[in-house]
Amino acid sequence: MFGKLFANFEANALLVVLSGVLSGVLSNPVPRHVPSAASESRVTA
């Protein structure tokens, strides 16, 4: 039961990070990895 919950949480976190990266790439084509990484860490923490 807890394993399934943890797997779902990991999948959700991965989706959030992927969607954040996609939206960042779409909003500004110039890659800025440092600000996106900082915002992602702020969201997950």
Image (cartoon, rainbow, N blue to C red):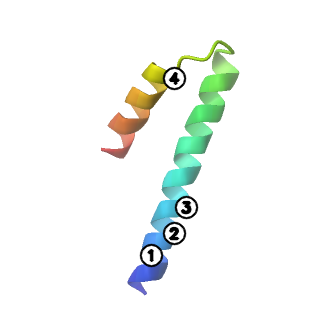
Horizontal side, residue 19 vs residue 38: left or right: right
Give the residue at mark 3.
11
Q: Which of marks 3 and 1 is nearer the N terminus?
A: 1
Crowd tier of the residue under label 4, counting other residues whose Cα lies within 10 Å: few below 14, some 14–19, many 20 or above: few
Q: How far is disc 3 from disc 4 in space, using C-alphas?
A: 22 Å
Look at the numbered discs 3 and 2 and tell me whether their residues touch, using CB distance below 8 Å: yes
Under mark 1, the amino acid is: Leu
Q: In this picture, is 3 found above or below 8?
A: below
Distance, label 3 to label 2, CA atoms, is 5 Å
Report how far apart the C-alphas of labels 1 and 4 lie in the structure.
30 Å
Q: Distance between the residues labelled 4 and 2?
A: 26 Å
Q: Which mark is residue 33?
A: 4
Report the residue marked by disc 1: 5
Q: Considering depth in this image, is 34 or 9 the residue closer to the camera?
A: 34
User: Mark 4 or mark 2, which is nearer to you?
Assistant: 4
Residue occupied by mark 2: 8
* Amino acid carrying mark 4 in the image: His
x and y percentages locating residue 6 in the rendered image: 43, 72
| Image-quadrant location for residue 24 | top right
Q: In which quarter of the image is residue 30?
A: top right
Q: Is residue 3 above or below residue 36?
A: below
Quick check: marks 1 and 2 in contact, CB under 8 Å? yes
As shown in the figure, which amino acid type bears the numbered disc 3?
Ala
Q: In this rendering, would 2 be left or right of 32?
A: left
Q: Residue at x 37, y 45 (%)?
A: 44
Residue plotted at (54% across, 17% down): 32
Point out residue 38 in the picture as x, y percentages from the top left corner: 38, 28
| SS under mark 2 | helix
The location of residue 22, given as percent across then percent down, is 65, 33
Crowding at dot 3, Cα within 10 Å, few <14 / some 14-19 / many 20+, comes out as: few
Amino acid found under the numbered disc labelled 2: Asn
Tag 4 and tag 2, C-beta contact below 8 Å: no
